[in-house]
Amino acid sequence: MARARKFYKGALGLKPSHVKNTGHGQWVEYEAGPHTLALGSASGWKASPDGCSVALQVEDSDAAIAHLRAHEAKFRVEPMPAPVCRMAMIFDPDGNSICIHQRKAS
C-alpha cells in the first residue's frame, strides 16, 4: 500500500481524503472531482492488468505523459489517438491499468 500511495500521489498528483487500516485490509480514497477513487488491499483482492481500470482526464496529455515518464511509469499502451481522445495506458506499481486521456475538442 505504501508503494501504491507514493505512485498515486507522486505520479498522478492525487491527494488522499480518507485512509483506513483495518484487520481485514488497508484502504485509501482519493477525491477526483465529484467522484472517489478507492484503492484497497486485502486477501483475495489481487492486482491485475485485466481487472478493473480507471480513466483519468487530463488537460494537457503531452505534459501528463512527460510527467509520468519522469516518475518512471510503465506504459501498457503508448500514447495514441483514439476516436474521442488522445490516450495512453500505464500500470500502477501493482499491475493495475490506468488510462490517461485528453478529450478531443468538440
Image (tube, rainbow, N blue to C red):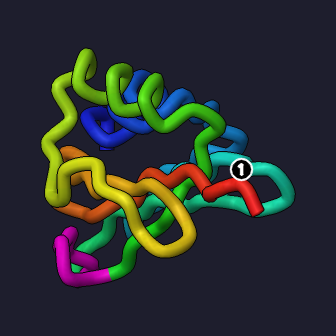
- Residue 57 to residue 17: above or below: below
Check disc 1 and give the amino acid type: Ala
Residue that numbered label 1 is attached to: 32
- Tell me which segment is drawn in magenta: 45-51
Q: Is 104 in the magenta?
A: no
Foreground residue among 21 and 48: 48
Foreground residue among 4 and 27: 4
Q: Residues within 10 Å of mark 1 (few under 14, many from 20)?
A: few
**Where, by quadrant of the figure, is residue 59 drawn?**
top right
- Regarding residue 94, the answer to whether it shows in the image is no
- Residue 70 to residue 84: above or below: above
- Residue beneath the point at 38% across and 28% down: 11
Q: Quadrant of the N terminus?
A: top left
- Residue beneath the point at 59% across and 42% down: 58
Whole-percent x and y of residue 9? 48, 28
Is 49 on the left-hand or right-hand side of 7? left
| Secondary structure mostly taken by the magenta-highlighted segment of the chain | loop
Element at label 1:
strand
Is 93 on the left-hand or right-hand side of 13? left
- Regarding residue 3, the answer to whether it shows in the image is yes
- Residue beneath the point at 35% across and 32% down: 65
